[in-house]
Image (cartoon, grey):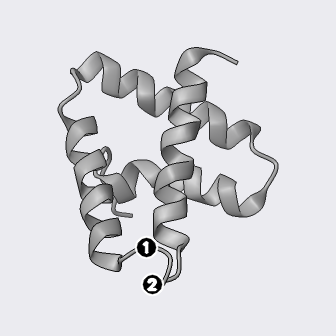
Amino acid sequence: MSRDRTLTGLLVDIIWWLESCEDEEVDPDSAVKMTESAGWALLQLPSDQRERLLKTLTGLAEAEQGPARREFLESFPFAIGLAEEQED
């Protein structure tokens, strides 16, 4: 597995964990702040690196066999602010 895929998968898993934790495990305000901070940092990447990240996310989603994680990977760019939902 490439470094990009490993680091991207780790980032997604951390955000997924923050979003799925019970309030007793992680303070909800702290989880939101961490997620927003990660999104802000990703938006600071140069455009070529953001594109590479989006391609890596697409590849991870296509290879993912677990439906819940695949759905999370597919929605991640929109949820974190890297992409905008296209209107029909």
Q: Nearer the viewer, residue 79 or 10?
A: 10
Q: Amino acid at mark 2?
A: Asp
Q: Which residue is mark 2?
A: 23
Q: Which residue is mark 1?
A: 26
Disc 1 and disc 2: Cα gap in Å?
5 Å
Residue 50 coordinates in the image, percent (x, y): 32, 27
Q: Would residue 60 be found to the left or right of residue 81 on screen?
A: right
Residue 82 found in image quarter: top left
In the rendered image, the vertical position of residue 72 relative to residue 51, given as above or below = below
Mark drawn on residue 69? none
Give the residue displayed 52% in from the left and 81% down from the top: 22
Given contact means CB atoms under 8 Å apart, are the residues at marks 1 and 2 in contact?
Answer: yes
Quadrant where the C terminus is found in the figure = bottom left
Residue 57 visible in the displayed image: no
In the rendered image, the vertical position of residue 15 relative to residue 6, given as above or below = below
Give the residue displayed 33% in from the left and 20% down from the top: 49
